[in-house]
Amino acid sequence: MKESIDRIFQELADLKAASQKEVEEARIRFLGKKGEVTALMEQFRTVAPELKREYGQKLNELKKAANARIEELKFAVEETADALAPKEDLSMPGDSFPLGSRHPVSIVRQQIVDIFRKFGYDVAEGPEIEDDYHVFEALNFPPNHPAREMQDTFFVSTGHLNPLLLRTHTSSVQVRTMEKQPLPIRVVCPGRVFRNEAISARAHCIFHQVEGLYIDKDVTFADLKQAILLFAREMFGPDTEIRMRPSYFPFTEPSAEVDVSCNICHGKGCNICKGTGWLEIMGCGMVDPNVLKASGIDPNEYSGFAFGMGVERIAMLKWQVNDLRHYFENDMRFLGEFATATEV
Ligand code: DAH
């Protein structure tokens, strides 16, 4: 038995393993149910009583040594496997993440601006917090015009002659442009506007407009009509027709409201155009002489036209979205639908 013990000690010292499988085989060979160390432990019963102490000790040491050696080999094999394993696979495709997309209102606003840029218009911007003068007074609103009243306008300050307020339309940028830019003027003014209105499918307290202004010598209503027709065809397609209905705005004279032929039923009548074949898209007119005068422009020398449209309204017509609130709720499912919308 002593020889066997010594031999096994030696074999354990010489033991090698190149894989986990070989480690396991070695474990079974020495420590398994029928393993060599296990067999010696069983033989221990037959050892003479006076030798039991000595062999008992030796066998315990052997078992311990066998366990330790197996653990040692196991660890060594793991280490080598780790060292050999490729650290990073640089050829692996990267994680993809969803691309964001532009907001439909931004897309349409940009389309409107780009169309007028092609016609030679510049872009002008003005403050969202404005004064009464630029939003109303310089635009020929009579002193007691209802648009100045609390139910339409969010006032920032009250109680003095020219209160601050959130602009209710981008026509205020017309005034600021006329004040500072040399003539002739040809601008579009995109921006956010604010009205004290209850939120519904058709109205919101914040929305977007694009204002247009063209002032030069001999600008006529025919020029206005042509500019709007060309815009409508770029925006809604080459077959689009326009019609103008007489209207009233304090800052234009004469004034008109513009309809485009329904791009869904092409004039036959459907529920989008409520059977009329026409869709209203903007207000417009010849700049009122009082407005020119207020900004120091001589109406005897210069004339001009102006127009103003709601960006959400154009977007609703373009994409047949019939609830304005979708544009403000930022529901990703709605916004995602415009991920592939192209710009002109
Ligand atoms: N400012 C008007 C509005 O907010 C829109 C408008 C109408 C603008 C006629 C114009 C215009 O420049 O000529 O309802």
Image (spheres, rainbow, N blue to C red):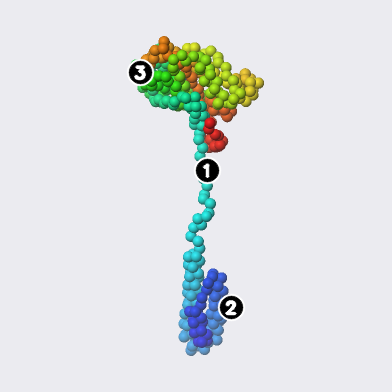
Question: For the view shown, which residue lies furthest in the front direction?
Answer: 217
Q: Is mark 1 within 8 Å of ligand 1?
A: no
Which residue lies under the disc numbered 3? 162
Residue 210 drawn at (x, y percent): 48, 24
The amino acid on which the numbered mark 2 sits, given as a three-letter code, is Lys
Residue 295 visible? The answer is yes
Q: Nearer the viewer, residue 51 or 310?
A: 310
Element class at badge 1: loop
Work out whether mark 3 precedes mark 1 in sequence or the reverse, and give the earlier one. Answer: 1
In this picture, is 70 found above or below 150?
A: below
Crowdedness near tag 2: few (<14), some (14–19) or many (≥20) residues, C-alpha within 10 Å: few
The count of marks equals 3
- Real-space Cα distance between discs 2 and 3? 103 Å
Q: Nearer the viewer, residue 27 or 235?
A: 235
Which mark's residue is nearer the viewer, 2 or 1? Answer: 1
Question: For the view shown, which residue lies furthest in the top direction?
Answer: 300
* Label of residue 272 in the image: none
The amino acid on which the numbered mark 3 sits, given as a three-letter code, is Asn
Residue 199 drawn at (x, y percent): 50, 25
Q: Is mark 2 within 8 Å of ligand 1?
A: no
- Real-space Cα distance between discs 3 and 1? 49 Å
* Label of residue 34 in the image: 2
Work out whether mark 2 precedes mark 1 in sequence or the reverse, and give the earlier one. Answer: 2
Which residue lies under the disc numbered 1? 98
- Real-space Cα distance between discs 2 and 1? 60 Å
Crowdedness near tag 1: few (<14), some (14–19) or many (≥20) residues, C-alpha within 10 Å: few
